[in-house]
């Protein structure tokens, strides 16, 4: 089974998905005139003012019941920041060498444009759900392209990917970290995680977003502070590490010559698993926000890509490369734990203890956010509370299974479903991206006029019947 899964995932993720992702990211960077670079100041301004729901609620443009823009941002970060940041980066370096980090940076910088497009579209085509907004690729495929079969296909793929496959990866990593640090039995960790997951997910989207907005920022800041401490302790090695990353990325030097292909593939694959730009997952979180203009959440979600990759993934990379043990045969979360121990020195396992706690919160928040992506898309297919309850129980079962399963099998299955849903979403946003670009132009025009941008359905008359949350009334 591992061999078959590995072969299929290799074809899909090493070639097809890498080419498609880079192509669409470059295309959207060009047609938006580098929105992810030229409007970075606007992104921070919006994030800092997004703690409360937009005034659009009281004006009637977005309706009622949505979560705040920051909560939607935290929900998407909760899904992004997890195994990919700590274990995925370690795997990328172990397999692709230090050069993989360069390509991870590149896919984040370019991919932020894809994140902007898909999240803006999610806002444009969102619908009113029970107590909150719902949306995402399945919704914009059906409403924008009028292809129900395509939308249902995506909904099934994202449910398999996030509700099941990615959640097995998250629980597997938590179990591995606690086994390494505390010799905790995987079965015990599986039971604990399953119970906690079921308690949170039966609380609904508002319970999930409240949990995420508290836990994620605290743990992310703590992890970055730890990385800074390790970098300061090894400050003399930073120039050497930067040179090592660049040299390996382009195959400079005899040792790095044969690694350039592996560096590109692992950097892009693990970069995507971590920041999810263009994948079609974070638009499900973006759609829940209550904002006065779709572009606002598109810009905030682009900032999420930077937060994930340029901050947290880079922190992990420097921790591992400063340790000098990345070629010692370790992999995944265990490599990150041992690298922190080595970076702090003194022969203590403080790093392993901290990472086990950090990965617990990072990966657990990913589990509950991933669950929500599946729920949103199951409700798209069939809005049945009974079906949702069955799905919740199945998610709990997959969380337990992931904790006791083989790492290679778990990652291989996750890569396959991720590649298929990504290709499905890329095809959709390549056709619908023109609407996000029109919205961007409208937003920039209103900004130049000194206004706080507000979107009306009449701005794009051809879509007025499909954008129920933006009615002019």
Image (cartoon, grey):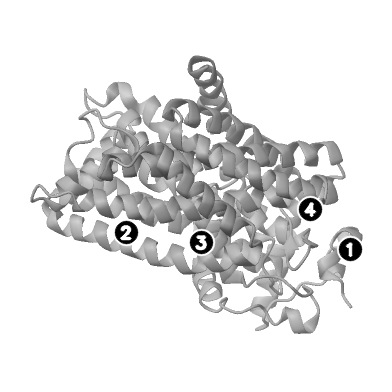
**167 sits to left or right of 176:** right
Query: Tag 1: Cα neighbours inside 10 Å, few (<14), some, or many (≥20)?
Result: some
In-front residue for pair 343/103: 343
Name the residue that disc number 4 marks. 385
Does dot 4 land on a helix, a strand or a loop? helix
Tell me the tag on residue 12: none
User: In the displayed image of the protein, which residue is found farthest to the left?
Assistant: 346
- Choose the circle earlier in sequence order: 2 or 4: 2
What is the CA distance from the residue labelled 4 to the residue labelled 3? 34 Å
Q: Nearer the viewer, mark 3 or mark 2?
A: 2
**Residue at position x 54%, y 52% in the image:** 197
Find disc 2 in the rendering and name its residue: 223
Q: Quadrant of residue 425?
A: top right
What percent of the width, then of the height, locates residue 329? Answer: 24, 27
In percent of width and height, residue 259 lies at 32, 25
Q: Marks 1 and 2, how far apart in space?
A: 45 Å
Mark positioned earlier in the residue sequence (1 or 4)? 4
Q: How crowded is mark 3: few (under 14 residues within 10 Å), some or many (20 or more)?
A: many
Please name the residue shown 73% across and 79% down the image: 56
The residue to which callout 3 is attached is 303
**Residue wearing tag 1:** 464
Labels 2 & 4 near each other (Cβ < 8 A) = no
Quadrant into which the C terminus falls: bottom right
């Amino acid at each position: 089974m591992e061999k078959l899964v590995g072969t299929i995932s290799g074809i899909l993720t090493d070639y097809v998905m890498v080419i498609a992702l880079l192509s669409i990211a470059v295309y959207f960077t060009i047609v938006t005139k580098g929105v992810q670079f030229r409007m970075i100041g606007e992104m921070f301004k919006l994030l800092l003012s997004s703690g409360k729901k937009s005034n659009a609620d009281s004006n009637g443009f977005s309706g009622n019941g949505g979560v705040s823009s920051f909560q939607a941002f935290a929900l998407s970060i909760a899904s992004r920041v997890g195994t990919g940041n700590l274990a995925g980066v370690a795997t990328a370096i172990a397999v692709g060498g230090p050069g993989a980090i360069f390509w991870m940076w590149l896919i984040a910088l370019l991919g932020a444009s894809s994140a902007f497009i898909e999240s803006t579209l999610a806002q444009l085509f969102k619908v009113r759900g029970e107590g909150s907004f719902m949306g995402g690729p399945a919704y914009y495929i059906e409403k924008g392209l009028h292809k129900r079969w395509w939308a249902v296909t995506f909904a099934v793929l994202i449910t398999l990917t996030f509700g099941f496959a990615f959640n097995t990866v998250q629980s597997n990593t938590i179990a591995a970290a606690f086994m390494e640090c505390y010799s905790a039995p995987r079965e015990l960790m599986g039971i604990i995680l399953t119970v906690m997951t079921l308690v949170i997910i039966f609380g609904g989207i508002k319970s999930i977003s409240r949990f995420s907005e508290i836990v994620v920022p605290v743990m992310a800041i703590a992890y970055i502070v730890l990385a800074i401490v390790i970098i300061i302790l090894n400050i003399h090695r930073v120039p050497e590490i930067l040179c090592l990353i660049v040299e390996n990325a382009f195959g400079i030097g005899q040792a790095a010559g044969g690694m350039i292909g592996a560096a590109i593939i692992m950097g892009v694959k693990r970069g995507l698993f971590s920041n999810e730009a263009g994948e079609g997952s974070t638009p499900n979180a973006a759609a829940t926000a209550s904002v006065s203009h779709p572009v606002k959440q598109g810009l905030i979600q682009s900032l999420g890509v930077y937060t994930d990759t340029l901050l947290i993934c880079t922190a992990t990379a420097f921790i591992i490369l400063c340790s000098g043990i990345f070629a010692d045969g370790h992999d995944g979360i265990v490599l990150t734990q041992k690298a922190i121990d080595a970076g702090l020195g003194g022969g203590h396992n403080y790093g392993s203890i901290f990472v086990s706690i950090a990965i617990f919160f990072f990966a657990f928040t990913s589990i509950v956010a991933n669950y929500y992506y599946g729920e949103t898309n199951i409700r798209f297919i069939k809005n049945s509370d009974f079906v949702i309850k069955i799905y919740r129980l199945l998610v709990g079962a997959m969380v337990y299974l992931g904790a006791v399963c083989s790492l290679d099998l778990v990652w291989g299955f996750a890569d396959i479903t991720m590649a298929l849903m990504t290709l499905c979403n890329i095809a959709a946003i390549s056709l619908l991206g023109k609407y996000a670009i029109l919205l961007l132009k409208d937003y920039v025009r209103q900004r130049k006029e000194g206004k706080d941008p507000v979107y009306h359905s009449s701005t794009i008359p051809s879509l007025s019947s499909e954008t129920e949350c933006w009615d002019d009334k």
